[in-house]
Amino acid sequence: MNFLEKANNIKEEVIRIRRDLHMNPELDFNLFKTSEKVKEFLQKENIEYYETAKTGICAIIRGKGDKTVALRADMDALPMQELKETEYTSRSENKMHACGHDVHTAILMGAAKVLNSMKEDLKGNVKLLFEPAEETTGGAQIMINEGVLNNPEVSAVFGLHVEPEIEVGKIGIKRDVVNAASNPFTIKIIGKGGHGAYPHRSVDPIVIAANVITTLQNVISREISAVYPAVISLGTIKGGTAQNIIPEFVEISGIMRTMTLEHRKYVKDRLVEITEGICASMRAKCEIQIDESYPCLYNDDKTVDILQNAAEEIIGKKSIIGLKNPAMGVESFAYFSLEKPSAFYFLGTRNESKDITYPLHNSKFDVDEDCMVTGIAIQCKSAVDFLNGYSI
């Protein structure tokens, strides 16, 4: 089966879909128009589906076997103004597809069209997971809780993300840990306010906060092995109203990023121990809130083998870049990767001759739309190879 040819045959249709989505971006779970466009497409292609996670969609192409593989795309945009002038520039003020989710959605719709056209030859089923709110709290966990990986049970999941640092026509693959886990946190240090001239009569939360901030950095530099990336970043510190007043409290907020489940738990525990310990020793109290954001994204070796073999047949070995380092950014596909063997890769979109070089989350971000042909072909080939029981 020549999936590259099949993808090229629907290239213009997929480009129209992508540009329509790009011109009409929506945020978070409020993807009503986006979801409707996907559903209309699925209805036209006679692909069954149901709604999940508010505006998410789970569709299924039923083949001739019991095995099931899933392909996933995220659909939401970012709250930012697009500054690049094109015929498909966003029509919505302060909303833009600056992370390429319009491309992901169009690729999955293209893959759906190709795979549905050959469903009589599929040795199993293909689920199509359209996820909302990846840029905020994520729809993946809700979709999982609502059963998208069941009935029929999914055995593996494939996903992708556009990457402007990789040339169009190429992909990047990272084995093992791909993306970090994140835990936003807020610390409130409660002291005793007073006059700046008489600090001994007060409990100064600013001085205590300084001790907490400094000591937390030692967790990364002295308690986590240097071969494992980890970060504690403090983003805000708020407290006080005047130069000569010691405030009653100070609030600190920041985020933790870790690469293993073990380090994630360790750093969270140590943040609590250090903060409570310093506050207690300096006569203060504290309130700590640690949010559970996205977990680490893990790539399964055997599933990546299937992906890599498929990609080699589509674009050739020289066009596959082995990525050495994981990304400190987060990705809600991680929830799927913790549930099922998964393969997540990076789809090259860069083309300097077209001035398509701007990074993700930039107001002038765009992609070379030829990337969608590559993405459709690799997704289809990976899914079919998995259902056919391909192994290295």
Image (cartoon, rainbow, N blue to C red):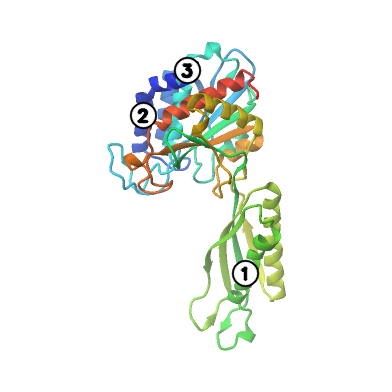
> What secondary structure is found at the residue carrying circle 3?
loop
Question: Which badge, 2 or 3, is on the more N-terminal residue?
Answer: 3
Label 3 neighbourhood size at 10 Å, few (<14), some (14-19), many (20+)? few
Name the element at disc 1.
helix
Judge whether 10 appears above or below 223 on screen: above
Q: Which residue is mark 2?
A: 15
Nearer to us of marks 2 and 3 is 3
Label 2: few (<14), some (14–19) or many (≥20) C-alpha neighbours in 10 Å = some
Amino acid type, mark 3? Asn
Alpha carbon distance from label 1 to label 3: 58 Å
Point 39% across, 49% down: residue: 362
Q: Amino acid at mark 1?
A: Thr
Res. 134 visible in picture: yes
What residue is disc 1 on? 214
Q: Position of residue 215 (x, y in %)?
A: 65, 68
Q: Is residue 50 visible?
A: no
Tag 2 secondary structure: helix
Give the amino acid type for the residue marked by disc 2 in the picture.
Ile
